[in-house]
Structures are given as C-alpha cells and as structure tokens.
Image (spheres, grey):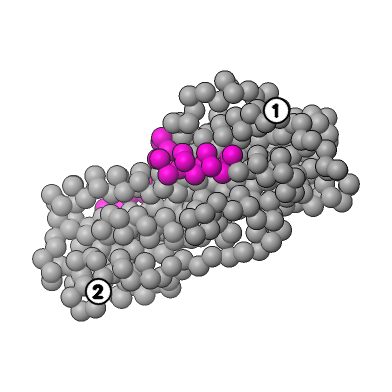
Amino acid sequence: MEQQVKRIGVLTSGGDAPGMNAAIRAVVRSAVGRGIDCIGIRRGWNGLINSDFVRMDTSSVSHIINKGGTLLYTARSEEFRTVAGQDKALATCKLLGLDAIVAIGGDGTFRGALDLSRRAAEVDYSLQVVGIPATIDNDIGCTHYTIGFDTACNTAIECIDRLRDTMQSHERCSVVEVMGRHAGYLALSVGISAGATAVLIPERKLDFDRDIVEKIRRARLAGTTHYMVVVAEGAGNTMEISRQIHESIGIDPRVTVLGHIQRGGAPTMQDRETASRMGYGAVQAIAEHRGNCVVATQEGRMVVLEMEAALKMTKELDMGRYRILEALTNNCGAL
Ligand code: F6P
C-alpha cells in the first residue's frame, strides 16, 4: 500500500512567465486542502541545492493570483545539470522530508525534473516529480498550451498597436522583435492578431524577397503607407533585417526589440485559469501516486502524462495559421 503524501515542495525555474504565481497558489492551496504540507523552494533548482526554502500556507499565497513574476524567484542552474548537484538537491529533499516536487517552468526546468527523477530512482529515494509547463514561448512538445503565452501575446500586441499609431502618422515601417527563443509560436500569434504585414519565424526558412520585400510592395500597391514586420527572435537579426529593407526598397524602418517587457504584467484570464487548473491537477496527481509526470493540455483538455514519455513528444507549428496570416494582410492581391 502507498504511503500517504505528507509534504511537497514547489519551485519555479527558468524564465519567469505571467501566471506562475497563480500556479504556485493553486499548488499550495490544493495541497493544504488535502492535509499536505507545502514548502516553497526559492530560486529554482538552486534552491534545492542550497536548501533555500520557505514554509507556505494558504495565506502566504494570498493576493498573488493577479501578479506577474514569481514570488519564489527563479533562476537557471548549471550545477543542477551535474549528478553532484542533483545529489545535493536530493539531500535537501530528504532533510525536509519531501515526498514530491512540483516544478513550474519551461523545457530546461523539465529536463531538470527528469534528471532529478532518474537520479532519485538510481539512489532508491521515493520522490514524485511533477512538471507544470510555464513559458511565454509555448514551445513544450507535450502540451498544447504553456502558462504565460496568452499574457505575453497580449502585451506584445498592445505594444505593436501603439507602434502602429506612430508608424501610421509618419508613414513608416516598423520592425518588431518578439521573444520565443527557437520557436515562432509567439511571433505567429502576435503577427496574426496585430495584423502584421509580414512575420518571420524560425520554422520557415527566410527568403528575403518573398517574405518581406514582396509583402511590403504588395501592401503599398494596395494603398498602405505603413508596414509592420514582426520578427521572432530565433528567425534572424532584427537590425540586419531592417538594414536590408532599407537597402532593397529604400524605406528606413524603425526597430523595436520588445524583450523582457513580454514576460511581465498581470496574467490574463487564460493564464490564471490554466495555472489554477494545472496546479490543482499536479497535487491531485501526487495524491493519487501517479509518479513522475507532467500536467499538460491536449485538445483543450487537461491531461497527466508520464514524464519520460512526455519529454520525448514534439509538436509542430501549425503552418495553416501562417497561410491565414498571409491571406488576411493587406498584400493578398496576388495570392
Ligand atoms: O524562455 C523564455 C524566454 O523569455 C525566451 O523567449 C528568451 O529567449 C529567453 O527566455 C530570454 O532569457 P533571459 O531571461 O535569460 O534573458
């Protein structure tokens, strides 16, 4: 018979994402509601290595559902990639009497979670490790959605709407870089929703004439006098793209790199609700002794996937959406 879960740890790791606080709140409150103690591990995996923790109860997560960032702080840990680092982390787990760890973060966090779960098995320490996907990049293969994506998209769209006002007044071209690391999910959703003239994503090999020059040219022929080019950070050098636009068609673009502004701000309803559901689901999985797993969304449903298998999953960017973008911009005359 499985032993009852008594105490769990929760941490956030990697780049922060709006909604992480809502996920922490959900984990803590769901745990406390089941009579499980909850310990907040601070500064990501480093917190487990350095025994950097804080006891949490229902009131320690009051008034955070609406806050961006993470009250547990976050970090990327090189040391945790080593077996020595993982052993130090397991020593902290033992000292604190943790039966499970909930790790909230992106793909680096998940790699760490898998490493820890494997090392725990090797040294025969009974520990459940559960991942909750949170990154503005939405680039985790096993889940349709990652916490933070919607807020980051909305922030970027709001910035682009503002840029559009000034670009329109001066009849200029704007080249805007959005985050996303090696993926184009953020750029594509933002581009569609902001009505961009062109969107460059890493998933599509850049053909400068086809993907930029021709699009601006067609927009001009259709009567447009200002242009918005959205560039995923993984798709190319924004300054270089701007320089090339100037060189090939003579217009002088203004470059804006949105950067970390996309990671901050109050989470949207979608991020608060998804985080709340995933946090609840993670604790439920632990209480049911589901073992090492990831809470994910697939086809709109919340699912719990075995971690090893989940981390092998991949997902493709829906290129149909790229075609929608092309069809809806003011350059579709010759499509
Ligand atoms: O993974 C989230 C993310 O914001 C990426 O979009 C970006 O490439 C990276 O993190 C930036 O990392 P840092 O916060 O270390 O500059």
Quadrant position of the N terminus in the picture: top right
Range shown magenta: 252-280
Q: Please, is residue 299 above or below residue 319 in the view?
A: above
Quadrant position of the C terminus in the picture: bottom left
Q: Secondary structure at mark 2?
A: helix
Q: Is residue 13 visible?
A: no
Q: Residue at x 48, y 48 (%)?
A: 136
Q: Residue at x 49, y 44 (%)?
A: 274
Q: Residue furthest bottom?
A: 334
Q: Residue furthest front?
A: 1
Q: Which residue is mark 1?
A: 35
Choose top left, top right, bottom left or bottom right for residue 191.
bottom left
Q: Which residue is mark 2?
A: 214
How far across and down, in percent of the image, does residue 244 sit? 31, 66
Q: Residue at x 55, y 51 (%)?
A: 302
Q: Secondary structure at mark 1?
A: loop
For the residues labelled 2 and 1, the Cα–Cα distance comes to 62 Å
| Residue 6 is one of the magenta-drawn residues | no
Neighbours of disc 1 within 10 Å: few (<14), some (14-19), many (20+): few
Neighbours of disc 2 within 10 Å: few (<14), some (14-19), many (20+): some
Q: Residue furthest right?
A: 124
Q: Earlier in the sequence, mark 2 or mark 1?
A: 1
- Badge 1 amino acid: Gly
Horizontal arrangement in the rendering, residue 142 relative to residue 245 (left or right): right
Q: Total of numbered circles in the picture?
A: 2
| Foreground pick, 220 / 22 | 22
Q: Please, is residue 268 above or below residue 248 in the view?
A: above
Pointer 2 and pointer 1: residues touching (CB < 8 Å)?
no
Horizontal arrangement in the rendering, residue 67 relative to residue 287 (left or right): left
| Foreground pick, 25 / 315 | 25
Horizontal arrangement in the rendering, residue 83 relative to residue 163 (left or right): right
